[in-house]
Structures are given as structure tokens and as C-alpha cells.
Amino acid sequence: MEKSTKGSVGVTPRQEDYSRWYTDVVQKADLADYGPVRGCMVIKPYGYALWENIQGELDKRFKATGHQNAYFPLFIPMSFIEKEAEHVEGFAPELAVVTHGGGKELEEPLVVRPTSETVIGHMFSQWIQSHRDLPLLINQWANVVRWEMRTRLFLRTSEFLWQEGHTAHATQEEAVQETLRMLDVYADFAINEAAIPVIKGRKSDQERFAGAVASYTIEAMMGNKWALQAGTSHDLGQNFARTFDIKYTDEKNEQQFCWTTSWGMSTRMVGAIIMAHGDDQGLRLPPRLAPIQLVVIPIYRSDEEKKNVMEAVLDICEPLISVGIRVKIDEREGLTPGFKMNDWEMRGVPLRMEIGPRDLEKNSVMLARRDVPGKEGKQAVSRDNLIPKITRRLNLIQRNMLMQATAFRDENLHEAKSYDEMKKIVEDGWALIWHCGKPECEDRIKEETKATSRCFPLDKNEEWNPKGQKCTVCGEPAFGQAYFSRAY
RNA sequence: CGGGGCGUGGCGCAGUUGGAUAGCGCGCUGCGUUUGGGACGCAGAGGUCGCCGGUUCGAGUCCGGCCGCCCCGACCA
């Protein structure tokens, strides 16, 4: 009972202070640390390993859908950013600008990329000549910088890591299709790898990417019922094609502007995983992304016991490792098994195996699930056929975490028939309303309730601007049904 | 940038109206006993008290000025 506050282990309970809980988890689970520069974080090995797993799964999906990786420069001429009117306006306040190089003032300031539509557009215009060059499907893994006022580890830092996909197409249909296809890729990744049940939707004009025709998003619900935008996909129309002169010659030998898209997912996803799954014991990682899937805790008293136990541990682990299960043996000396159990729970390892003298006698091991707290999640299993037993459990945990998160989300989605009803709902959940999509209306809602429009969910909107539906808040014709909630 | 708070070993803090060698918990090092849900004993290491200046016989403590951080508000993956 008096365990969660002892020493350097244990986190602030979520109910007491959710932000502090989050910060505690990030630091105590050893994911990240604060860097010397305001708003910049250091991603520690454990956190980076998680990011690498995220990268791996996404990258696989990008390749499978025909995209190729490339790399574009960090520095962008200021003039590039200024070319697209809405784009500058959107990004101007958060640009980091380099004015000096080699001890001299530069003729033209360089912007540290906040995103790469402009440079990539510039290059695309040189690479694309003919319809035979299309579609051009490019992705880059990179860091970007957006000067932020208030920062939080993983969720909003001045520098962050992400991937940005950039594609050019011959037709609008194809570009729209690409935008939605990549949204599906993100949703598939979130649901099946991260075990986060996201809602796919379209952003309001207010929330739309600066320079896009339409922005799509996957929205996830965090443990405090706030929303987190976990990935975005943008239909850029011909906006960037026109400003950067991305043209191709069609079959009739006529010049046409391309239709472009861009889409991104960032290290913010790590924050989403923490907040969608974490509990008062700390982090809970979905097995498919967890850097360590199975942690093994040897238990022994004497040197004699230690020798026997360690022998069994290696014996048991070798085949598991050889089939690709990510196993960690906790051989640290001078720490009790109890401490180690709590420590690895804090770090979110999905499955734990305890091996001690009693297990050797019975030719068994103890398995404990992170997603089922306490004794209930613990089970002695025989040493025979451990590979399928462990694989099965990891799959179960993965599925269970998705189920838990889905149940939690669904409990907190509510339709609101009136503005008053909506006000109540968004205090502690997401409200679905008919919404006009007008910035003035959204501003008012935000002012009065602190909630913002998250998205017009695709599965609840067969068509935009349906006849006869009125905005629940202002009474103007509705663009569609939209979720509103507090958001990160 | 506005409001609130805070800077003291790695972390969290205490330090009274100025007073002696700056203390406590956790962590860290060594040794021993422990080890199936956050072990214990003993012995150690580690601090220009954010920075600069001032008042004073004497400043962690008082005054002034900087710097940095955290929380709350307007922008954002």
C-alpha cells in the first residue's frame, strides 16, 4: 500500500496530477531527459529503441505502398518559405532562422526546416518532366524545428524527429487517394502496432495544415480523455505545385501542374503510447513495439543456487532469442527480485519471467503479464514448449491492450444534441456534434469550453455539407459531424 | 509576452529574527548479511548554496541587478 512513493521509483498517481504523472513516467521509465537548451529533449536509449521500432513498422508500410526514402537539407532559404502565402503565415511564428555562417552574416537567412514542402517542391519541379515520372512517392526521416513556447517531452518539443512523406501525382483523384491511403496506413499502424484505437477524420479549416486544401488526421484518446493528434495526411491540391512550378507534360504534350500530398508522424507517437496505455505503476508498452518484450528475473540465495538458476535462465532464453523474441535478462547484483519487478513494470515491459529454485524443482517458470496487475496476471507454466506459450501471451497482451483502450475510448465518446449538453461532455470526454466548421464558431467554443475541434470523423460523415443539418452551436448549415475535446 | 512559484551534493528537500565545521532522505562507492513484490548493517565519496554586485565584524539567509527553470493563459506534429 505505501509503495508508490518510495525512493526514486514510483510515479505521481494519474488522478492526482496527470501532467506530473506523464513527466514522471517519461523520466523514470528512462525514455527521455531534458537537454541543455530550452524545449529540446534527449531521447535516451530505451526511448530511442521504442522510436526505432515505430520507425521500422512505419517504414515497412511505406515501402509496401511504393514509397522510397530520400533525404533533403536541413536549411531552407527564407525565400522558399515565403513563397506560399498561407504556409508562411502558419509557420512564421515558430521559425528558427540562421543569420550567420562562417563568422559572416549571410546574404539570405536560412530557415531550419519546420517541414519540407518547400525544398522538396523545389526539387520535385526539377525532377518531374513527364507524366511518366509520376507518381513520385518520396519519404524522408528527419528532424525538424518549430520554436515552441510551452514544451513537453515527446508531445511538443522545439526539435522533434519524424517522417514526412511527399508525393506528386498527375491527377487530383490520385492525390486524394494517396492522402487517404496514407491516413489508412497510419491508422493501421496505430491500431495494430501501438494498440491505440484512433479515429480517422478530416480537420476543420481552423486546424488545417498551412497551405493544404484538406488535412486528415488520426485522433487518439489519452488517459485523461484529452485528444492527441497522432498523425496527419494532407491533400495539398496544386498549391505547392503552382508556387514551386511542379509541372509535367501529359500524353497530349500539354503542360500540367502536379497534385501533391504530404503526411507525417512524429516522436509525438511515443507520447501517445505513454498516455494511451500507462497506469499508476508506470509505462505499459504494446508487445509489438516494446524494446524488451520479455524480462527475465533470476531468483537465488546461495552461489550454488545462482549457478543453477543462471544455467536454466540461459537455457530457456536462448531458443526464445533465436526466434526473435526481444528478451532481457536482469542480472543486476545487489537488487532484490521485488525491486526488479517494480522497476520493469515502471518501464512497461509486457511480460516478465521469474526463475528461481522452486521453478527448477518443478521444471516450470513464473510468467507475469504487465496488462493484468497483481497476482491475477501471474502464472506458473511448465518449461515445455515455452516459445508458443510466450508468443501467445504477447499476442494476448497486445490484443488486450487494444481492447482496454478501445473500451475506454468508447465510454468517453458522446453525442451532444445541444451546446449546453456539449459543454458538459467536453469537461471530461469527447463530444460529437453537427458543426459548421467556421473558425469564428470554433473560436467561440474554445473560448467558452477550452475544447477544440478534433476532426470530422470519416465513418460518421458520408458526405460533406449534408442538406438540412445545422451546427449544434451556432445554427449555421453544418459541414458534418465533428468531435470536440480538450487536446494536447 | 502577462500572472504564480522556484534555484542549496546526481534527485527530492530542510536551513528560524543574519552567527560557529551547511544538514536530511533517496541515489552512489566498498565490505558483510540478504534475495519468490520496492532488504539491512557498517564504513565512505560527493556542495564555488544559479551568477554579479552591495550592506555587515560576519550572508545560503538582507538589498539591487542579471540568468535559468517549472506551472497557468494566447500559437502548434
Image (cartoon, rainbow, N blue to C red):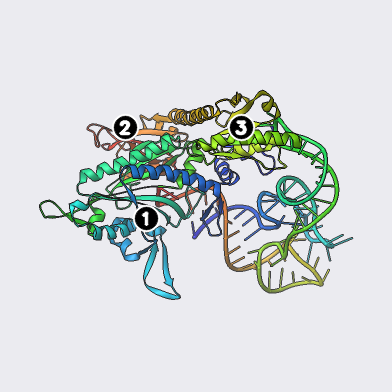
Checking the image for residue A115, the label placed there is 1
Residue A209 x %, y %: 33, 49
Badge 3 crowding class, 10 Å Cα cut-off, few under 14, some 14 to 19, many 20 or more, is many
Name which of mark 1 and mark 2 comes first in the sequence: 1
Residue visible at 52% across and 28% down in the picture: A393
Secondary structure at badge 3 equals strand
Badge 1 crowding class, 10 Å Cα cut-off, few under 14, some 14 to 19, many 20 or more, is many
Identify which amino acid the numbered label 2 is placed on. Answer: Asp
Identify which amino acid the numbered label 3 is placed on. Answer: Met
Residues at marks 1 and 2, CA–CA distance in whole angstroms = 29 Å
Identify which amino acid the numbered label 1 is placed on. Answer: Thr
Q: Which residue is mark 3?
A: A353
Residue A83 x %, y %: 28, 61
Q: Is the Cβ of the residue at disc 1 closer than 8 Å to that at disc 2?
A: no
Residue A158 x %, y %: 47, 55
Q: Which residue is mark 2?
A: A459
Q: Quadrant of the N terminus of chain A?
A: top right
Between A103 and A472, the residue placed more toward the observer is A103
